[in-house]
């Protein structure tokens, strides 16, 4: 487990020193490809106020030939134009590129950018799975992994992210699930051979901006539905992170954003609440964006529009544990975690641009 190196709270002197160091450091040039989707627009919103970067380009997922456009929702925050996708421009004008593109487009573009010397943070799923057979099943468009790929679950992979040429930003469901379960696995508290059940519910923005019958307002409003049962790629990603089988069922909530994961695990009979609290304290005592709330079970509204993951739990004497983990799927589950990884790659405070 890798922990945050900076303290949670900085003194005034430390803040002044940090500001002075930031002023002396040249701003990194960053670009966003796929800037018109939900995660792309969230990236622009975060990067436009980021003190350590200059946003040099924002592109759609379409190729050259399309018309440039603006984003009214970002007026006076970022008044640039969204240009057609151009690999040449990304190579020329950016030190770090965020890819918020479909899997196939990211699988093709990311290796070329890495080979050209650009560092990449990819928000698609194209490079998340290490196992070739699993990748062939879930992401068949990905024919090769570039050298220096890191899985970007920041709190657990900080050192790998810092050195990476390409960061595979985690999926939203795996972020919520792994941050909650992994500390118990690390502490050896999970009962051997017992099933892990992840019952997760997401707002509609998790399905992306491309409309479908399932995400139509009339279908979603006033309803709650399960989907991807035994057939969702994020299940494979959660299993990769834990090294064991997981029963994962996602559900669609009639809200715009947020994920709540209710997770069922078993520990040894008699395991106390204090033992669980100690495991989370070891894992996240210095983590800027994980809030351990114990028995005060968290809600989606507590984390909406933030980069926080809140984790709570209840345990009974027989060893049954119910974990509740909540994130904003567009921030900690996507764009916010991507910016957090950018900060790690640049060697600056992880909180920059996020608080």
Image (tube, rainbow, N blue to C red):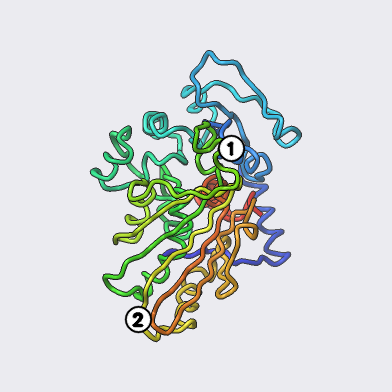
Which residue is drawn at the image coordinates 50% and 75% (left, top)?
314
Residue 319 screen position, x and y as percent? 39, 79
Whether residue 132 is visible here, answered yes or no, is yes
In this view, the residue farthest toward the left is 133
**In the picture, residue 60 is in which quadrant?**
top right
Whether residue 343 is visible here, answered yes or no, is no
Dot 1: within a 10 Å radius of its alpha carbon, few (fewer than 14), some, or many (20 or more) residues? Answer: few
Residue 205 screen position, x and y as percent? 56, 42
215 or 311, which is in the foreground?
215
234 or 338, which is in the foreground?
234
Q: Which mark is residue 218?
A: 1
User: Does 230 sit above or below residue 35?
Assistant: below
Q: Is residue 208 left or right of residue 195?
A: right
Q: What SS does tag 1 mark?
A: helix
Q: Quadrant of the N terminus?
A: bottom left
In this view, the residue farthest toward the right is 76
- Residue ID for mark 2: 268
**In the picture, residue 72 is in which quadrant?**
top right
User: Does 99 sit above or below residue 232?
Assistant: above
Which residue is drawn at the image coordinates 44% and 39% (left, top)?
124
Which residue is drawn at the image coordinates 55% and 48% (left, top)?
223
Q: What SS does tag 2 mark?
A: loop
Residue 262 screen position, x and y as percent? 48, 63
């Amino acid at each position: 487990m890798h922990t945050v190196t900076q303290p949670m709270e900085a003194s005034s002197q430390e803040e002044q020193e940090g500001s002075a160091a930031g002023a002396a450091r040249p701003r990194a040039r960053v670009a966003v490809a796929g800037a018109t989707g939900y995660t792309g627009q969230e990236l622009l919103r975060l990067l436009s106020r980021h003190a350590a970067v200059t946003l040099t380009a924002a592109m759609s997922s379409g190729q050259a030939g399309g018309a440039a456009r603006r984003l009214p929702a970002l007026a006076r925050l970022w008044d640039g134009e969204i240009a057609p996708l151009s690999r040449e421009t990304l190579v020329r004008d950016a030190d770090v590129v965020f890819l918020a593109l479909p899997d196939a487009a990211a699988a093709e573009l990311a290796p070329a950018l890495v080979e050209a010397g650009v560092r990449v943070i990819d928000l698609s799923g194209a490079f998340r799975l290490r196992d070739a057979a699993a990748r062939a099943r879930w992401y068949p468009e990905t024919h090769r992994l570039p050298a220096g790929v890191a899985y970007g679950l920041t709190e657990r992979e900080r050192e790998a992210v810092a050195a990476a040429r390409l960061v595979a930003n985690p999926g939203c469901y795996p972020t919520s699930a792994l941050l909650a379960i992994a500390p118990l696995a690390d502490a050896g508290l999970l009962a051997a051979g017992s099933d892990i059940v992840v019952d997760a519910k997401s707002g509609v923005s998790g399905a992306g901006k491309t409309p479908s019958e399932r995400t139509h307002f009339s279908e979603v409003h006033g309803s709650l539905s399960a989907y991807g049962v035994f057939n969702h790629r994020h299940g494979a990603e959660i299993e990769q992170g834990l090294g064991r089988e997981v029963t994962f069922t996602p559900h669609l909530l009639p809200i715009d954003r947020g994920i709540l994961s209710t997770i069922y695990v078993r520990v040894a009979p008699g395991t106390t609440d204090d033992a669980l609290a100690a495991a989370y304290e070891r894992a996240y005592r210095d983590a800027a964006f994980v809030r351990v709330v114990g028995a005060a079970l968290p809600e989606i509204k507590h984390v909406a529009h933030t980069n926080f993951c809140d984790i709570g739990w209840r345990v009974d004497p027989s060893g049954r544990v119910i974990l509740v983990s909540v994130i904003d799927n567009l921030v900690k589950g996507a764009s916010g975690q991507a910016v957090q990884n950018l900060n790690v790659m640049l060697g600056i405070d992880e909180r920059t641009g996020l608080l």
